[in-house]
Amino acid sequence: MRAFVITGPGRCEVQDVEEPVAGPGEVVVDVDRVGVCGTDIEFYTGEMSYLRDGHATYPIRIGHEWCGTVSAVGEGVEPGWLGRRTTGDTMLGCGRCRRCVGGLHHVCEDRYELGIRHGRAGALAERVAVPVSSLHALPDSVDATAGALVEPGGNALRAVEAAQLSPGDRLLVLGPGTIGLLAARFALARGVEVHVQGLDEASLEFARSVGAHGAWTADGLPPLPFDAVIDASNAAHLPARALELVEPGKRVVYIGLASVPSRIDTRALALKDVTAVGVLSASPALARTIGHYASGAVDPRPLVASTVALESLSGVLAGVRPEGAGPGPKIQVDPRL
């Protein structure tokens, strides 16, 4: 079986590896589509914090935004899963601790993260083994492109839900990447006025094309009152800026992560009576995300710029834009190519 493996900073290759086997409570999925995200790039560059704190080591098989079809089931798994199209949760908790029992498996101290944490092989391969408990079935109305956008969509939906916006409210999204633009799409579906701040005109023009009411550079941002600010960027200075921009008594949501510590002035947080929320994972919102996609309320597919083969992924991680790619921020991989 072919799988994409990062062997060290700046080093990666497609390798022939052993076929996955469905253990008790597991299934094997034939992978149809996988998204490439910033976490994957950080593993390639060596900047991923898990490499420093011991939660991950090289070599690593990445890939956590995926969809596919169940081709084998292990002991204790209902045979009805065979042949079903599915996606799955990245966060695989122990199932026994206080957090898991309380519905917070995505912050379990001993969790595995598919393709990310504690060596659990990811989905950038022809097949992947995952626990059946992590699966979410996909309806026919959610195709492979959208199916591999359920995981980032769940993160974005949680960010919008945390902002607690009502129709007619005004939202500012910092960062027109995949998560930021998906958050914009979910907010637009709620009747929210959405503005996006980014760095360059090309990304801002794309944000406008997918529905943003306004798209601005930092210098051009108008002095509007924002009922919520979602920081979906990787810039260390923007968490503090988000707190400056949000209206008193409203909410700031932090979902982007910088490679170095970010700082905010908690005096401003308290004196403005602002609520700040951090979002780690899509886990609690995966089913709702599928529902939004299936109903047509949110269509994530315009964000995908190109779909490439496993052999082309090394260039993507190194920052090479695939030939003929569209304007969207997301690159996907089809391991069958």
Image (spheres, rainbow, N blue to C red):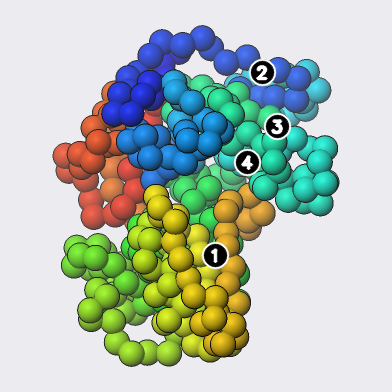
* Amino acid marked by disc 4: Met
Q: Is residue 20 visible?
A: yes
295, above or below 33, in the image: below
Which mark's residue is nearer the viewer, 3 or 4? Answer: 4
Q: Which mark is residue 159?
A: 1
Label drawn at residue 91: 4
Residue 74 in picture, x, y percent from top left: 72, 19
Q: Which residue is mark 2?
A: 22
Q: Identify the mark nearer the N-term, 1 or 3.
A: 3
What's the mark number on residue 315? none
Question: Going from the N terminus, do you reach mark 2 or mark 1 first?
Answer: 2
- Whether 251 is drawn above or below 261: the answer is below
Residue corresponding to mark 3: 132
In the rendering, at what x and y percent does residue 9 appear?
33, 29
How packed is label 3: few (under 14 Cα within 10 Å), some, or many (20 or more)?
many
Q: Quadrant of residue 175?
A: bottom left
Distance from the alpha carbon under mark 1 to that under mark 3: 26 Å
Give the CA separation, mark 3 to mark 2: 10 Å
Picture layout, residue 178 above or below residue 217 = above
Marks 4 and 1, the one that precedes in the sequence = 4
Dot 2 or dot 4: first in sequence order is 2
- The residue at 55%/87% (across/down) is 272
Q: Secondary structure at mark 1?
A: helix
Along the viewing direction, whichever of 82 and 39 lies nearer the viewer: 39
Q: Which mark is in front, 2 or 4?
A: 4
Viewer-side residue, 97 vs 316: 97
Marks 3 and 2, the one that precedes in the sequence: 2
Q: How many numbered marks are there?
A: 4
Q: Amino acid at mark 1?
A: Ala
Q: Amino acid at mark 3?
A: Val
Q: Is residue 193 left or right of residue 297?
A: left
